[in-house]
Amino acid sequence: MALQKKPQHADPDYWQSVIDSWRLTRLSVSRFCRNHDLKPHQFRYWQYRLAPATKKKSSSSSKAQLAFTEIKVPLSTTLIDTPTILTPFELITPSGYRLKLNADFDEPLLIRVLTLLEALP
């Protein structure tokens, strides 16, 4: 889909059409912007600015929900020197995604997955 010519001033209607066009593709924001000679930071700004107010509220409150929660794991008094069996657990994101993780999960990979999930429309 061809985009309209870029307006001289900030035009919400223009940027809404750009964002709608991007949603029809399966491209990342950076690839879409590169293909259409757009600046990714401007795209993200307008994407945030044009998001419904309820989505903005939930995303700002979800940042607070991404804090870590302490999980108390009882120590076995009889098997102190024996390797502990790591119990898997489930992580539910504020967006509703459920991730089942082993206790020895790969933290950098988890951070990348969470970042990608939060970027989905």
Image: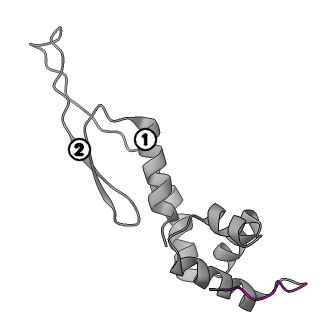
Three-letter amino acid code at disc 1?
A: Leu
Query: Residue at 18% across / 21% down in the picture?
Result: 84
Determine which quarter of the picture holds residue 53.
Answer: bottom right
Looking at this view, is 29 or 105 the one in front? 29
Is residue 2 found left or right of 54 in the rendered image? right
Mark number for residue 30? none
Mark 1 and mark 2: Cα distance apart in space = 16 Å
Q: What residue is disc 1 on?
A: 109
Count of marks, rendered view: 2
Is residue 72 found left or right of 1 in the rendered image? left
Is residue 4 found left or right of 92 in the rendered image? right
Whether residue 41 is visible to the viewer of this picture, yes or no, is yes
For the record, the magenta segment spans 1-8
Q: What is the x, y in percent for residue 79?
A: 11, 13
Q: Main secondary structure of the magenta part?
A: loop
Determine which quarter of the picture holds residue 45.
Answer: bottom right
Mark number for residue 89? 2
